[in-house]
Amino acid sequence: MPKRKGYSPIGIDLQAGSAKMVQLHFGPKGTSLVGCKAVTFEESLTRIVDQKPEKIVDQLKQAITSAGLSGRRAIATLPAAKVDVRTLTLAGSEDDLEKLLRWEAESYLHYEVADASIDHAKLGEVSAGNEKRSEVMVATANKTYIREVMDLLSEAGLMVQAIDIVPMALWRLGIRLAEELEAPVSMIDIGRTSSVAVILSRGDLRLTRTMARGGEELTSRIMQGLDIDRNEAELLKKEYGTGMAGGAARFGSQDELVTKTEVAGTIHEILRHDLEDIADELRKLFRYFSTQNKGMAVGRGYLCGGGGRLKGLDAYFTERIGVAIEQLPALDVVLKAKNNPDDETGPEYAVAAGLALRVDGKE
């Protein structure tokens, strides 16, 4: 990884209803965390044209100031619903790739290809009989929406160097974890509305998969299953996670006294289908990687994102997938920082930190 000095750009993990920001400092003692901040928007970023979100600009300015973040440079993601990231297996030369990507995009975009910004990164080659084909990660977003987001961030006093994607951010941060590990590693980001998993091997990003389930869906399941409001659902999700047993608690809007074991079993049953779906997607991803790499197996997975903190999720996935899954350590541990050993800034800031690690708008 290239050596750098000074402050990083501000990494902004931008979602429709929130943002998480991280800035790093690269000094003689290594990489350290300058500051981080999470903000929940009073308005939505989903449709900027229809509702000019002036309040978001003010909230971003206040967050940057209160977190002590420096400079104007920034690298941001787009809200998950506004960018399409997928892996395609394509045959053909490098010269044909641009045409192939645009031709493929026509089959899945809900707007004209001419209005799309399409970028790609090669992940490696796979064999199809006697033919070698390229596995390509493709990111597609509407040009107009990209401009709107950049204008919005500019109004907040930021100069956007690049719009990036979650898999690349996870790869940059994952490299720091995988430096001392020989076996392939997975980074699993359980986001608000969707989840993203990547596999790294020997420093390279090899596979990625996006899953249309996130922490917000789990909260909604609990709300519907128990007929309670969002605050109650969030408290139960935080307390019981995947369904851990314990002593006694008051449960539901009826304030009925029940055992924690009963509550845990109920929460587990409500979330079971969604958690099994995510586990199944991860299992398929790991199996495909092994098939394409002569039996090489993923050795470990790290949970990040706000949903990655769900109590018991690491043990649940370990059991269901058969691969050791653990919570991402604090960022200062991942970055091997020496000046803030007690800092506990953790998995929810993983994407923002990976954005801040991007070098000069490249990688």
Image: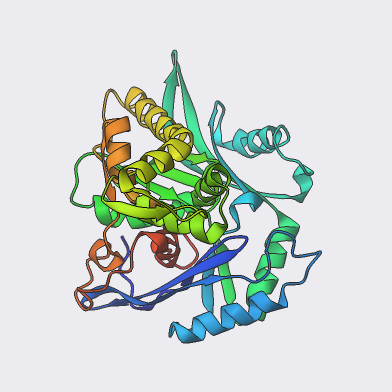
In front: 71, or 228? 228
- Quarter occupied by the N terminus: bottom left
Q: Residue furthest right?
A: 50
- Which residue is depicted at the point 58% across and 48% down? 227
User: On the picture, is 123 further left or further right than 179?
Assistant: right
Query: What x and y, as percent, mark residue 247?
Result: 26, 51
In front: 98, or 112? 112
User: Could you tell me if residue 123 is visible in this image?
Assistant: no
Q: Indicate how the structure is coloured in the image.
A: rainbow
- Which residue is depicted at the point 51% across and 37% down? 136
Query: What x and y, as percent, mark residue 199?
Result: 36, 41
- Which residue is depicted at the point 19% across and 46% down? 181
Q: Residue 84: which quarter of the image?
A: top right
In front: 307, or 340? 307
User: Could you tell me if residue 225 is visible in this image?
Assistant: yes
Query: What x and y, as percent, mark residue 311?
Result: 33, 51
User: On the picture, is 362 further left or further right than 25?
Assistant: right
Q: Is residue 123 above or below residue 144?
A: above
Q: Is residue 55 above or below residue 166?
A: below
In this figure, what is the number of numbered marks?
Answer: 0
- Quarter occupied by the C terminus: bottom left
User: On the picture, is 205 further left or further right than 159?
Assistant: left
Query: What x and y, as percent, mark residue 359?
Result: 42, 65
